Image (spheres, helix red, strand yellow):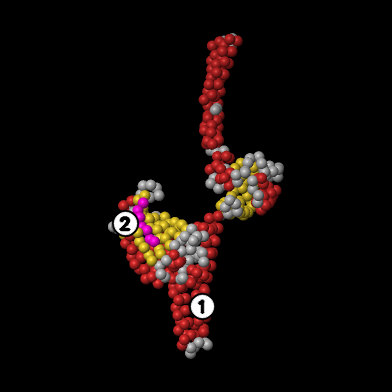
Amino acid sequence: MRGNALRLSARGIAVRTALVAVVIFGTAAAIGGGSLFWTAAAAFTTCFAAAALFRNTMPLQDRLAAPVRRREGILTPRALLAALPDPVVVVDRRSLVTGMNAAAQAMLPTLREATPLSFALRSPDVLDGLEAVLRTGGQRKVEFGERVPIERAYEVHIAAVETSPAADDGQRGAALVFRDLTAARQLEHMRVDFVANASHELRTPLASVLGFIETLQGPARDDSTARERFLGIMREQARRMARLIDDLLSLSRIEMHAHVQPQTPVDLLGIVRHMIDTLTPLARESSVTITLTAPDGPLSILGDRDELLRVFENLIENAVKYGESGERVEVTVATSPGRSGTAEEVEVTVRDFGPGIAPEHLPRLTERFYRVDVADSRQKGGTGLGLAIVKHIVNRHRGHFAIESTPGEGAAFRVRLPLASTVAPAE
């Protein structure tokens, strides 16, 4: 509508200009009495007036369209590719790379323009899908994975791009968009592993309890000695299931409130002392001595007392159970500058002197149900969730949890938490 109005306006101005030119020409001719001089002067004047008017009227549409052309010039294909967060590669009908963005260059370091895509991407499924799209048009969706330098999974959307109005003139290209599925696949694997592990941990003691019940109802119905022994085993298996369920519920509650930092001042040193006193009888039964090295006075942090008790219960109890061959457990509490060099923190280290942990196990110790020795862990009443709970509680308190170990020299578990005086108030 606007373009039509502009054309009508320009046409009207042109008509008015022609009328003015005729008037000027006639007037000049009348004054000159038809002489050649005045006729030429009138013609010159008419042309000059028409040119001046048309200079201000006819280019009006072009002048209005110029800024649009300049704005359109900014949206170049390279600018659009650079703005996309996912890796994108554009190829021509011969599968030669004609464009890419920085994400694609980072994913495929050997990717170069004017070279075949197969030089940088060695995936038969993707290349076959690309060939089919270039031949028949349409879209394809293909998955492929990488194993080096790290394992990753991608979903590739391949779509035909027509470079001319005709679809069969041999000028068809294609765009490949890579969507990273690695995080989603890892979450899915974690969910599947969690369900499988939880089911296995519950199924084993449950099968044991059911088996003993059937025995007591059958052959051992009147055997008082067997009945007492079986009831004792059933009680231990039931306690194992109860511990596992308690740990699962605790982990669920902690994850539910992981984004909410506790704001209650608590004495961390008092919590550590309380847990050492609670676990001293267990340590005495295992011939293990627990020692504490700590400064005088309270060390106040913002935290949840019950959750922090759970942290140091798990760490000290594990040190007693798995490091009993070292006959001692050292607990050290000290203050130190924060990792940023400004905020002061309190560090609690629980060290045992047992067999230690091999380096390949250290990165996975905080995973759910991960155990270095499954049989030994179950024999000692472990659920495989203790260190996962510790990690989540420490993260909720905006702290840091680290594990250090050398085989044959024991292991050290360090918890660093910000002191209350250095914690920024929650918004």
Give how far across and how far down residue 270 sits, in percent: 32, 62
Report the side of 285 relative to 167 (left or right): left
From the image, give the main secondary structure of the stretch colored magenta: strand
Report the side of 409 relative to 169 (left or right): left
Pointer 2 or 1: first along the chain: 1
Q: Was residue 240 drawn as part of the magenta stretch in this picture? A: no
Position above or below: 336 against 282: above
Q: In terms of depth relative to the viewer, which is nearer, 67 or 373?
A: 373
Position above or below: 56 against 208: above
Report the residue at 41% width, 57% height from top: 414
Look at mark 2 in the image and give the residue it sits on.
295
Give SS at disc 2.
loop
Amino acid at circle 1:
Ser
Q: Residue 325 sits in which quadrant? A: bottom left
- Span colored in magenta: 330-336
Give SS at disc 1.
helix
Q: In terms of depth relative to the viewer, which is nearer, 58 or 229?
A: 229
Give how far across and how far down residue 357 sits, in percent: 49, 61
Report the residue at 51% width, 78% height from top: 208
Look at mark 1 in the image and give the residue it sits on.
208
Q: In terms of depth relative to the viewer, which is nearer, 228 or 262?
A: 228
Q: Are marks 2 and 1 in contact (CB under 8 Å)?
A: no
Q: List the single residue furthest toward the bottom.
A: 222
* CA neighbours of label 2 inside 10 A, class few (<14), some (14 to 19), many (20+): few
Q: Was residue 333 drawn as part of the magenta stretch in this picture? A: yes
Report the residue at 53% width, 27% height from top: 57
* CA neighbours of label 1 inside 10 A, class few (<14), some (14 to 19), many (20+): some
